[in-house]
Image (spheres, helix red, strand yellow):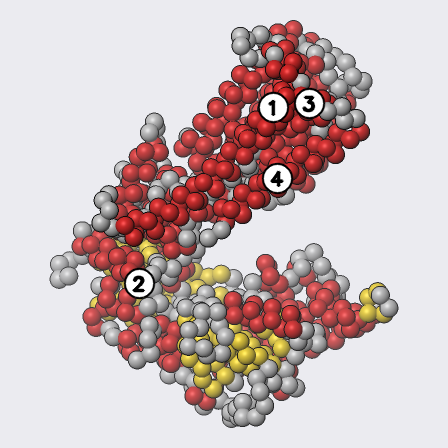
Amino acid sequence: MSTIQRALVTFKGTSKSFGAVRALNNVDLSFHAGECLGLIGHNGAGKSTLMQVLAGTLAADTGTMQVEGRDLRASYNVQLARQHGIRCVFQELSLCPNLSIAENTRLMSPAIRGFGWRREARARVLACLDEIFPGHGIDPDDTVADLSIGKRQMVEIARAFVQVDEPLNLVILDEPTSSLDARVAEQLLRFVRRFVAKGGSIVLISHILAEMLGTCDRIAVMRDGGVVDIRPAKDFDHASLVECMGSAAKAAAERKPFASKRLQGTAVISQQPPRQRDGRTVDAHAGEIVGLAGLAGHGQSQWLIQVLRRCVATGQGAALVAGDRQTDGVFPLWSIAENITVSSLGQLRRGALIDPEAEQAMAEQWRQRMSIRTPDMANPILSLSGGNQQKALFARALASSSSVILMDDPMRGVDVNTKREVYSIIAEEAARGRTFIWYTTELEELDHCDHVYVFRDGQAVLDLPRNQLSEEQILRCSFEEQLV
Amino acid sequence: MNASTPIPLKATVARPARLNRARLLRGALPGVSLAVLLVVIFVMQPRAMSYMGMNLMFNLAVPIALATIAQMLIITVNDLDLSLGSFISFVACVCATVLNQHPLLGCLALVGCVAAYALLGALIHLRKLPSIVVTLGMSFIWMGGAILLLPAPGGTAPQWLQAIVRYKTPLLPFAIFVCIALALVVHLFLMRSTLGVVLRGAGGNPIAVAKAGWSLLRIKVSLYALAGTFGVLAGLFLVGLTTSADASIALRYTLLSIAGVILGGGEFVGGRVSPIGAVLGALTLVLAGSLLSFLHISPDWQIGAQGAILILVLALRAFVNRLEAQP
């Protein structure tokens, strides 16, 4: 690596905002031929946004983006990325389930055409599959819908390496091994090294530190939308990587005194995560705020839904505050008041009908309590800003009589002031004996919890009371294969 | 492969074989149900096995098959066309009036119809409107247009059109050849060509298709325009057979075409369609009607009995799907 490397793509001062949220902040990073660059960081560090900018599915707001020596930021898009040989295997699968593997290959490579295109597509994708995953047992004529999730991921990866006419310089692999078993993952990583040795470039994102340290040439650590450290992989080890990902020297002074609520009584909720192997359960006691941490998509939401199902089935009752407002949260055609009172209709009945006055009173009470900023609670819910919509969803859960409130990363995309208001209300309600279970992707929010569980691969791998909580520990458990 | 590695070989072959069987069964279902219906009809009414009998039975099948293909193209991108029946009625009225009197103007009107469908596709895509709502609204517009053209049943189909649809082919009736040709041509286009892959992909995973650099707008516009074309063909064929038109001549085609697509193995969402299946499904529906007449079931009960046949076939398919889903 002592030779001068050709930079394929260079970001300089690249920034990207979504509304008030700064997803990328002055990123300087270059991608070289013949190198595997690792990208690591906690949830929301900006890895995925940066990769989407590189793949052309998102446009950067400012800065320059040099591709093979020319600044293309303004005009960059998916087609241009492909023309420069930049391809991406995204985390969410992008195959068409109704088509065969050969047909999906053709979808990505318009150069396969004319009479006999089917045969050619079949041969090409099969060659890539054989090269990357020898002994894969996949027939290119199989319909994608019939494949297991692991095989779909193998197809997805192999398809990105099919090369017809177009250049193939850089491939982004975003958590490529997440649904592959260990043997197949090993095959992939070996292929990555072979590809890089032939002069290709790979960007690897993975939560498994051993994979990153063993495969990458350089590792860039991202935090809060910026690259905070970049070094050759051999200069990193498990501990220093974890250290880099955490935020620098956090003021621990303002921590409130801690008293565990677990000393007496039994747990209100006690449920084993779906893939837990050691029989450990995730517990919550009355009046406790329990935090679920770990990287996104490692079984926290599934566990919450499991708990919700059980609570509903046993009649215990539980309210869920959804994180994905648009799909799981609001009734978009209803008013704010209706959105809040919908889970408490039992209390608002007069005879068989709903009492409109009681409904209005309840809505008004929660408007003041949550300070929802609207002139009239009869306005449609979509007239509110995102943060206020989320407040309404909190009000819906808190207004119900449930003693258990489940929160599925509810603060996604919510502004700081709203967050602060909601935190204080959660603390108040917990003091009154309600139990909160809070899945969050933001590390700071865990400071509000009494007890924290860290999830990885569908299992709770760590549980700690707040006074023993450290960010470093959470990061290590989120990323580590085994606890060292 | 030799026998020295029996275990992995078994593991990779055994599962697909079962899956293949279920898939084969699923693919064969439309053909099998059609064959069963045909056999039952022939047994009950041997005279139907003649050229004349087949001609009578399948005569009206072509417009329904064309309409079913049109509907299938819309269903490919997870939309539904509720205006197809009134659109075909409108086309039939145009043919029986304008096309007969002013051929050039009539041709322009028909081209305009296709363009209107293309625009609908663009509108639905750009404004993210539910296709059901837009086409339901359009159905009243088409019906209104048809009534304006032909307030009372009447008009005359152009002579050349009548001559084409009554063309006499050797061995089997013209309608059967048309249906076979239709199924094969659309199959080659949609299932075997590279363009067809993109069109179906847009139904399976639109985001992935867009990420691969294809324009969803163009895909939708092309499919709607194609559907409009097949709708126009259905109207032409229908009016050629009936020689005169009426504003409500094809209203029942909307539901028949949807039922035909589903009978033929198509799914409402996910881009899973089959042109050959759709044509077979349309023929099955037509024959189901004939069978009920042969059974001397009074017309009052026929719609209900047709529904029962539909439920039977769909239940069979659900059963096959369950076979496929078993691990």
Letter of the chain that mark 2 sits on in the rendering: A
Question: Could you tell which of marks 1 and 3 lies nearer the N-terminus?
Answer: 1
Tell me the distance, in whole angstroms, between the alpha carbons under discs 1 and 2.
Answer: 55 Å
The secondary element bearing badge 4 is classed as: helix
Q: Quadrant of residue B245?
A: top right
Chain letter belonging to callout 3: B
Q: Which residue is mark 3?
A: B290
Tell me the CA gap for discs 2 and 4. Answer: 42 Å
Q: Nearest the camera: A468 or A53?
A: A468
Instruction: Write the residue at 22% across / 49% down.
Output: B4
Residue B263's disc is none
Residue B71 is at least partly visible in this image:
no
Nearer to us: label 1 or label 4:
1
Read off the residue under disc 4.
B314
Under mark 2, the amino acid is Ala
Asked if marks 3 and 2 touch (Cβ < 8 Å), the reply is no
Q: Nearer the viewer, mark 2 or mark 4?
A: 4
| Residue B39 position in % (x across, y down) | 60, 24
Q: Residue at x 65, y 13 (%)?
A: B47
SS for tag 2?
helix
What type is the residue that disc 4 sits on? Leu
Question: At which x and y percent is residue A168?
Answer: 27, 46
Tag 1: amino acid: Leu
**Label 2 neighbourhood size at 10 Å, few (<14), some (14-19), many (20+)?**
few
Task: Tell me residue A95's x, y (percent).
Answer: 42, 47
Give the Cα separation between the discs numbered 3 and 4. 20 Å
Check disc 3 and give the amino acid type: Ser
